[in-house]
């Protein structure tokens, strides 16, 4: 396994293992094993100790785990702790470990959170309202959910989403200039944290060709154009609204603002299907999950790739500040 060296005094990170029945525990431990010892000690694991101990034993990493900072969070019964099983206890465990990591960051015990993949069905089976890590960050931090956004980073792109896990009809009903502008500003602030102080921003239109001057609807004129004007008035370098296809083909921007889930997810997943990072931005806590799922079909088999976790650690530690540059 290749050793990854981080810069001197990188940020302290809280690493939550996600759904304990998925590949989260495995990729978390494998990622730690790939770091140098000083970098490893800047990371604290958050997850059920029993599952991590079992996984470490299977991977031959028990000595590493014994030396690792760890918080036992999200304990679940032996019956529920079965790799590959979609289980409400496991869903609740993922939320508990991520919440504990977020709280630690709020207290100043960490500077950012990394969350391994959750399983939305398991969480909903547990009776929990959940629409992704941005909503959880908002709730734990006591902030409005519509002011915490998802930004995908990967494949040479950074894309923040004004709306996310909801029907297209519901998303269109929520889109307003203030929401679009807030998503863009959160993205700009996140870029600054990643080392890009004055990003050039491209804003996608809602309709094809950004409505073609009203030919394809009035939504862009009503909701996106006023947001772009307000952002420019605030001193930001913003282009748009323009068709997403045109902006992405140009590749002249450091940050893109997508109106809908698929506008932002499809290009990043196409270019970086298993290596993207998903940042929850706009709150006082910065959380990044990985851009892939919990892979229940291979959980417990020891073959999961920790590359996305390592790339996210690198991103939050400043060594990938230029990831996404055109």
Image (spheres, helix red, strand yellow):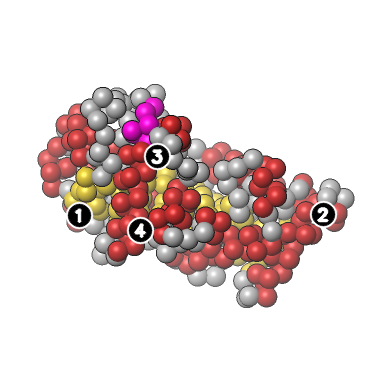
Circle 2 SS class: loop
Please report the residue visible at 68 percent of the width from the left and 54 percent of the height from the top: 175
Please report the residue visible at 50 percent of the width from the left and 70 percent of the height from the top: 197
Please report the residue visible at 44 percent of the width from the left and 54 percent of the height from the top: 139
Pointer 1 residue? 41
Q: Report the quarter where the N terminus lies.
A: top left
Pointer 3 residue? 117
In 3D space, how far apart are the residues under numbered discs 4 and 3 (Cα atoms)? 16 Å
- Classify residue 102 by image quadrant: bottom left
The furthest residue to the front: 127
Which mark is in front, 1 or 4?
4
- Disc number at residue 81? none
Percent across and percent down for residue 253 are 61, 59
Percent across and percent down for residue 91 are 37, 36
Q: Are marks 3 and 1 in contact (CB under 8 Å)?
A: no
Q: Earlier in the sequence, mark 1 or mark 4?
A: 1
Q: Which residues are magenta?
A: 86-91
Which mark is in front, 1 or 2?
2
Q: Earlier in the sequence, mark 4 or mark 3?
A: 4
Which mark is in front, 3 or 1?
3
Q: Earlier in the sequence, mark 3 or mark 1?
A: 1
Pointer 4 residue? 112
Pointer 2 residue? 218
């Amino acid at each position: 396994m290749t050793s990854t060296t981080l810069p001197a005094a990188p940020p302290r990170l809280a690493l939550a293992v996600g759904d304990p029945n998925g590949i989260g525990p495995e990729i978390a431990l494998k990622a730690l094993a790939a770091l140098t010892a000083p970098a490893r000690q800047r990371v604290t694991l958050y997850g059920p100790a029993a599952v991590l101990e079992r996984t470490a034993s299977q991977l031959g990493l028990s000595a590493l785990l014994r030396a690792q900072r760890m918080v036992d969070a999200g304990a679940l019964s032996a019956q529920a702790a079965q790799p590959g099983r979609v289980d409400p206890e496991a869903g609740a465990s993922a939320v508990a470990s991520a919440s504990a990591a977020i709280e630690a960051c709020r207290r100043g015990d960490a500077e950012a959170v990394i969350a391994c993949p959750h399983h939305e069905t398991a969480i909903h089976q547990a009776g929990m309202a959940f629409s992704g890590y941005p909503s959880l960050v908002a709730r734990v931090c006591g902030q409005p959910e519509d002011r915490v956004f998802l930004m995908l980073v990967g494949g040479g792109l950074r894309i923040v989403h004004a709306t996310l896990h909801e029907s297209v009809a519901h998303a269109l009903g929520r889109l307003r200039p203030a929401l679009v502008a807030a998503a863009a500003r959160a993205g700009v602030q996140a870029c600054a944290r990643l080392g890009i102080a004055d990003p050039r921003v491209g804003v996608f239109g809602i309709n094809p060709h950004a409505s073609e001057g009203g030919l394809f609807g009035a939504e862009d004129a009503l909701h996106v154009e006023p947001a772009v004007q307000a952002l420019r008035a605030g001193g930001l370098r913003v282009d748009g609204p323009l068709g997403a296809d045109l902006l992405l083909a140009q590749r002249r921007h450091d940050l893109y603002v997508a109106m809908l889930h698929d506008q932002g997810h499809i290009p990043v997943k196409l270019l970086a299907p298993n290596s993207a990072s998903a940042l929850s931005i706009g709150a006082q806590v910065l959380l990044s999950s990985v851009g892939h799922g919990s892979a229940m079909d291979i959980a417990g088999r020891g073959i999961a790739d920790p590359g996305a976790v390592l790339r996210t650690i690198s991103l939050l530690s400043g060594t990938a500040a230029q990831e996404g540059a055109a």
